[in-house]
Amino acid sequence: MSSSEKILIAADHAAVDLKKALIQNLKNTSFEDLGPFDANSVDYPDYAEKLAMRISKGEAKRGILLCGSGIGMSIAANKFPGVRAALVHSAETARLSRMHNDANVLCLGSRVLKTELAIECAKVWLDTDFSAEDRHQNRVNKISRIEGNHCR
């Protein structure tokens, strides 16, 4: 990740504290916080849409979405063309989501990951590049083709 690249980040009410912890602990990362900013109840699809739309439009290259399980955010974000949102649960799945799948949105669950592990996952994800080996690029291209054929 280039030091000037801004990473979008958003959460729902269940993950506001995890969002704050990521921003505080990943000091070498420039974040644009899309909210929410308190623990009042919100609907995760609203924040997934806000972030994923910007990735889909090319306004940002990568983002991090957080909710209680990470599942809802990943489902909602993956509805947008060009978004490859990966729900990860370990540093290894974070690394592989970037290296093999060119994931551009990281999804983490605040209720299923300890804060320290979530921070480690985010660090690894941010520091890992897509391998761009032919086999991986071909698979990402197939995903894009499926999107083009089936998503409007």
Image (cartoon, rainbow, N blue to C red):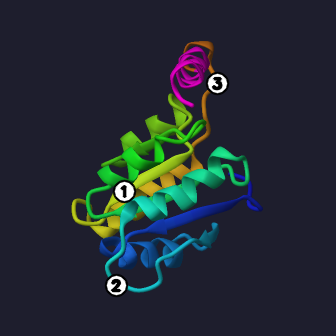
Q: Residue at x 60, y 36 (%)?
A: 82
Extreme-front residue of the structure = 152
Specify the segment rendered in magenta.
Answer: 137-152
Is the residue under label 1 in contact with that under label 3 (CB below 8 Å)? no
Residue ID at (46%, 78%): 36
- Residue carrying label 1: 108
Which amino acid does the dot numbered 3 rest on? Ala
- Give the residue pinned by disc 3: 132
- Compute the Cα span from label 2 to label 1: 19 Å
The image shows residue 50 at horizontal and vertical percentages of: 56, 61
* Residue farthest along the left direction in this orientation: 112
Answer whether residue 140 is magenta in the image.
yes
Residue under numbered circle 2: 40
Q: Position of residue 114 (x, y in %)?
A: 26, 66
Categorize mark 2 by other alpha carbons within 10 Å: few (<14), some (14-19), many (20+).
few
Residue 5, position as x, y percentages in the image: 73, 58
Mark 2 or 1, closer to the camera = 2
- Mark whose residue sits in front, 3 or 1: 1
Spot the residue most to the right. Answer: 4
Query: Magenta stretch mostly in which secondary structure?
Result: helix
What is the quadrant of residue 56 in the picture?
Answer: top right
Q: Is residue 11 left or right of residue 145?
A: left
Q: Nearer the viewer, residue 94 or 151?
A: 151
Quarter of the image for residue 67 reads bottom left
Q: Is residue 119 left or right of residue 60?
A: left
